[in-house]
Structures are given as C-alpha cells and as structure tokens.
Image: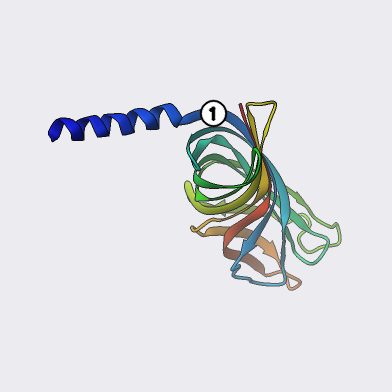
Amino acid sequence: MKKLLFLSIFLCLGTYYLQAQGNFGFQFQLASNRFVQVEKQLNTKMNSTFFYSLNLLYRYSFGRIALHTGIGYVPLRYNIDLLTMDNIKTTLYYLNLPLQVNYKIPVGYLQALVVGGGVDFNLYLGKSESKSFDIASPLFNAQNQINSVSKTLQIAPKLSIAYQTIILDEEILEVGFFSSYETRKYQLVHHPYFNQDGAAQAIIRQSHALRFGVEAKLFF
C-alpha cells in the first residue's frame, strides 16, 4: 500500500514537472496616476498625471494557472497648482517588485482571457522636483520647499484582465487593463510660502495613490 502511494505521488510530481513551463518576458505599462482621499488645505489643486514603466518578468505556468514575478521601475508623478500661476511638479522613483497569480479562460484556438490578482511591492529610490512661480505671485522669491514623505516600501494590491494569444508558435502576448491601489498614505508637505498678508503658510496633505491603465506583456 505504501509503495503504491509513493508511486502515485511520484507520478503526480513528474507529470506536474513535465507540464509546467517557465518563460522570461517584458511588461510595458501606460497608466494614469491619481491621488485619492486627499486631505486638502488652502486653495490648491492636485492634478492627475500619466506615467509609463518597463518591467522584466518571469512567468511560471501550470495548466490554466500562472505565477508572474519580476523587477522594474515606476515613476510616481504629481503636479500641484496653487491656483495662481504657480506650479510644483514632483516625481518619486520606485523599484517595482510584482507578484501576481493569473487564471486563463480559453476563448478560442491559442487564445484566452486572463484574469489576475496580486501585489506590487514598490521600494522608494528617490525624487526630483521642479517649481515655477509667477513674478506677480506672493510666492515669487519666497523660500519654497516641497517634501514628499513616503514610506520606504509601498504595498499596492493589483487586479488585471487581459487578452492572451500565441504568436510565432512560442511567444505569448498579453494585452489588457490593470488597476492598483497603494495602501500606505503619502504625506506631502509644502512649506513655507507667504499669503497675501505676508504670513507664512504651509500645505500638508495625506493621500493614497491609485493607478489604472493599459499593459502589455510578451513572454519568450
């Protein structure tokens, strides 16, 4: 009985190994970045921005299930208008480590609908800033500074849906839509600037980052 059980387990593992397949590939994303649940102060406006990112992926599949992981780069951009002629633009740079599980639903010969869910781990690398002030603005010639206090690690649950097809007999192409939501708040501090009465003011915001857009994956 024990020998039969051992043989059955051995055959199952052998079949799993033979059917499983690993592929390297690339992922390109074009998406909108939006801050949500913003705690607003003063007459300011935070604009949505677009970004693109490129990832190196590894895909390990067995039957209809596939595990995706890899490494890439994500720029988180945002603009803040102070409702004068003044504008502050900031980009936060992240190293992206995705982990996702996909399920394939066949819809035709060598074609499928792929739905997936997972988590993006974004490691903070640094930032860049640019500011423009109107010469007639009370901000002009004032000492202005922007601090983006972000967590070293941002965790973003992600959902996606894509169309998958086989090209050139072996390459796997997936094109679809995704959305992710960073669970840890950003604290955006802009200080100091001077209002019309010459008094020092500060803007303090806390918000989450929501991203949604299109993505394409090509595996070899």
- In this rendering, the count of numbered labels is 1
Residue at the far left in the pictured view: 1
**Above or below 113: residue 97:** above
Type of colouring: rainbow
- Provide the residue designation for mark 1: 23
User: Helix, strand, or loop for circle 1?
Assistant: strand
Query: What is the quadrant of residue 217 in the picture?
Result: top right
Residue found 54% across the figure and 59% down from its top: 187
Label 1 sits on what residue type? Asn
State the image coordinates of residue 35 (x, y, percent, origin top left).
Answer: 63, 61
The quarter of the picture where the C terminus appears is top right
Which quadrant is home to the N terminus? top left
Residue plotted at (49% across, 57% down) = 184
Q: Residues within 10 Å of mark 1 (few under 14, many from 20)?
A: some
Residue 50 picture location, percent across and down: 73, 50
Observer-nearest of 32 and 143: 32
Q: Nearer the viewer, residue 171 or 101?
A: 171
| Relative image position of residue 87 (x, y in whole percent) | 77, 56
Residue reaching furthest right?
136
Residue 202, placed above or below residue 29: below
Query: How far across and how far down the image is residue 92, in percent?
Result: 61, 46
Residue at image x 34%, y 27%? 14
Taking 29 as reference, is 149 left or right?
A: left
* Image side of residue 154 versus residue 79, left or right: left
Nearest the viewer among 204 and 210 is 210
Whether residue 164 can be seen here = yes
Residue 9 located left or right of residue 150: left
Q: Is residue 91 visible?
A: no
The answer to which of 196 and 190 lies nearer the viewer is 190
